[in-house]
Amino acid sequence: MSLVALAARRLPPEIRQWLRSAALRAAAVAYAGSGVTCPCCGRTFRRFAPFKGRPNEQCPGCGSLARHRALFLFLRDELRLEARAGRILHFAPEPALQRWLARLPGAEYVSADLDSPRADMRIDVTDIPFADASFDVVLCGHVLEHVPDDRRAIAELHRVLAAGGDAIVQVPIRGDVTFE
């Protein structure tokens, strides 16, 4: 990890968020063009920016990664969330998805995280303070690999999911190895 990255981790979350926004504004100018379109923000660029050594990965406009764009398309086109009213619980909210989900007509959107400044509520995924079957959609992206008791977390996600609801739980997969 670079010294800059180490120093940035010590900054308050609000300052890190401001720096991230400034970097995205600069990247949007640097990647101006019409080669790709981000489904999350609708903006076009010459190409997506590299991210953690992966080329063509991050949207210079909204910061979404390839996995966020794929999830956005799945939620929009397969689950048709824009046409569904209901309650959505979103752990570790990705900014591009959060902006879209929070504006869905007829939906009640709740974002949750232990320490993210962009989350609506500070919630431990192993102790969710909502009633049984209280959400129609539960999203939990790249959280379980950080939770010591992932079985309890999964039980809690299942507990708050309404019958017939949809839960999308993502974890990192690198090659043919599962990291636990």
Image: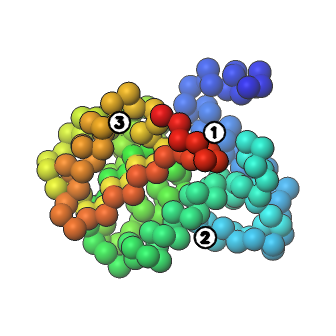
**Helix, strand, or loop for circle 3?**
helix
Specify whether 8 is left or right of 104: right
Cα distance, mark 3 to mark 1? Answer: 32 Å
Cα distance, mark 2 to mark 1? Answer: 23 Å
**How packed is label 2: few (under 14 Cα within 10 Å), some, or many (20 or more)?**
some
Amino acid carrying mark 2 in the image: Pro
**Helix, strand, or loop for circle 2?**
loop
Residue placed most toward the observer, 126 or 30: 126
Specify whether 106 is left or right of 171: left
Per the image, the residue denoted by label 3 is 150
Q: Of discs 2 and 1, which sits in the foreground?
A: 2
On the image, the x and y values in percent for residue 103 come to 41, 65
Q: Residue at x 61, y 66 (%)?
A: 41
Per the image, the residue denoted by label 2 is 39
Per the image, the residue denoted by label 1 is 18
Residue placed most toward the observer, 151 or 5: 151
Q: Disc 2 vs disc 3: Cβ atoms closer than 8 Å? A: no
Q: Quadrant of the N terminus?
A: top right
